[in-house]
């Protein structure tokens, strides 16, 4: 199976009806249709019962579709799985879920290898392992990922980055289920399920001659597409509460509607990871009163921030032009601006030096000195 799992059993029923009508003796295909519908309900029950969907928070149809596919392939097949999606969409969480749900593999290990860290020739031992003395610096024998993942799952993250020299080797291991550690003359057996993730388009890499066609078709027997956050904005409030709870280690506070609006409309090129970082920033301002208010949202994220920035710049430009026209040089301009900033900060902070210094990002001592200094050109 490739792509998403059907959203509802009616789609299966409709497809089944077409099959029955098309077959010579409609009854022979009925058991198959019935089995598929039964399977659909089984998968749906598992998805509903997953505790927080195995760490993947969200109720949107796009995420549910991906989850159904993950459950289906984890439970009912042993084929390699390719998880595709933009960066930060939860591909690694999805891979972990396959391991947790695979009845044959879950008691075995989950071995994670980030292919961006495999430098051709230098790091092949990371996959194959090596004997003592196999190369300079190999002071003792070490097992590699192929051996470590025996009876479990091998997760190759960013598989599009797998060096070309290792691609035929991986294909061979998948076909033969044997490998030879570096420096060894003995073939070892291994039995792992392969799960890969990529944010690159493997088909394009193949066209560019950077990925082997036979390996790509082997890896993508089953694919799961993790949807970008822009396709599941409905999930943002639940994700926001989830991350606040994680960061604050308490029951998540109530998020004011205005904050929820800010969170749900902005773009997220970094997907869920970016949302998590934003919530971590917001949590810094939380004072423990059970509410997340707009004041805790970083200034740059608040409505009108971009427009305000534009206005500020325009006003500043006009003021600087006027000062230059009046004959002020750069030095004079700088100290005039500093003087005004100090005056405003002190007025806003009721004359308290410490608070004003904090607002200006200087030490209290520096502020004291500046205050003691006569203004340029003054008496
Ligand atoms: N649906 C989700 N529910 C809860 N947390 C999520 C969800 N999706 C992603 N995350 C969190 O977002 C962060 C990024 O997720 P993950 O590392 O799985 O993404 P990825 O697609 O593998 O990213 P990359 O391609 O950059 O490696 C992690 O902290 C993960 O826990």
Image: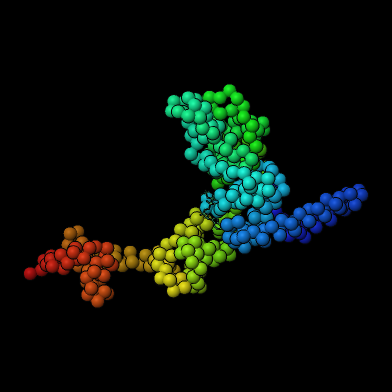
Residue at 37% x, 65% y: name it: 309
User: Does residue 135 lie above or below 281 as drawn?
Assistant: above
Percent x, y of residue 119:
48, 34
Percent x, y of residue 266:
49, 63
Residue at 13% x, 66% y: name it: 373
The answer to whether residue 126 shows anywhere in this view is yes
Q: Residue furthest left?
A: 379
Query: Who is closer to the viewer here, 372 or 80?
Result: 80
Q: How many marks?
A: 0
For residue 54, side relative to residue 340 (left or right):
right
Picture quadrant where residue 184 is located: top right
Percent x, y of residue 344:
25, 72
Q: Residue furthest top?
A: 185
Query: Who is closer to the viewer here, 210 or 60?
Result: 60
For residue 22, side relative to residue 43 (left or right):
right
Percent x, y of residue 324:
21, 62
For residue 28, side relative to residue 123 (left or right):
right
Query: Who is closer to the viewer here, 95 or 236?
Result: 95
Residue at 19% x, 63% y: name it: 366
Q: Quadrant of the C terminus?
A: bottom left
The answer to whether residue 324 shows anywhere in this view is no
User: Does residue 47 lie above or below 151 as drawn?
Assistant: below
Residue at 27% x, 74% y: name it: 348
């Amino acid at each position: 199976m490739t792509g998403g799992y059907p959203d509802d059993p009616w789609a299966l029923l409709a497809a089944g009806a077409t099959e029955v009508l098309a077959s010579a003796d409609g009854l022979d295909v009925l058991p198959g249709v019935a089995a598929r519908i039964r399977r659909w309900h089984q998968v749906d029950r598992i998805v509903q019962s997953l505790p927080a969907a195995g760490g993947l928070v969200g109720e949107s149809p796009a995420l549910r579709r991906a989850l159904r596919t993950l459950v289906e392939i984890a439970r009912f097949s042993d084929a390699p799985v390719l998880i595709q999606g933009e960066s930060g969409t939860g591909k690694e969480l999805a891979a972990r879920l396959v391991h947790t749900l695979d009845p044959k593999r879950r008691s075995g290990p989950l071995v994670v290898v980030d292919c961006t860290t495999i430098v051709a020739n230098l790091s092949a031992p990371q996959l194959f392992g090596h004997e003592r003395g196999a190369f300079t610096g190999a002071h003792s024998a070490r097992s590699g990922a192929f051996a470590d993942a025996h009876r479990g799952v091998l997760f190759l993250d960013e598989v599009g980055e797998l060096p070309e020299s290792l691609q035929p080797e991986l294909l061979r291991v998948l076909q033969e289920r044997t490998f030879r550690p570096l420096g060894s003359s003995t073939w070892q057996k291994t039995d792992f399920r392969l799960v890969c993730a990529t944010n690159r388009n493997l088909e394009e890499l193949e066209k560019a001659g950077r990925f082997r066609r036979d390996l790509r078709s082997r890896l993508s027997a089953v694919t799961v597409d993790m949807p970008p956050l822009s396709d599941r904005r409905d999930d943002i409030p639940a994700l926001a509460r989830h991350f606040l709870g994680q960061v604050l280690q308490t029951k998540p506070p109530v998020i004011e509607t205005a904050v929820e609006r800010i969170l749900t409309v902005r773009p997220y090129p970094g997907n869920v990871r970016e949302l998590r970082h934003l919530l971590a920033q917001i949590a810094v301002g939380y004072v423990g009163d059970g509410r997340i208010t707009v004041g805790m949202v970083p200034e740059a994220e608040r409505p009108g921030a971009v427009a305000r920035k534009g206005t500020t710049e325009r006003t500043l430009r006009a003021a600087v032009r006027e000062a230059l026209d009046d004959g002020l040089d750069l030095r004079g301009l700088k100290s005039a601006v500093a003087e005004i900033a100090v005056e405003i900060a002190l007025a806003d902070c009721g004359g308290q030096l410490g608070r004003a210094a904090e607002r200006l990002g200087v030490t209290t001592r520096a502020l004291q000195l500046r205050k003691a200094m006569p203004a340029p050109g003054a008496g």
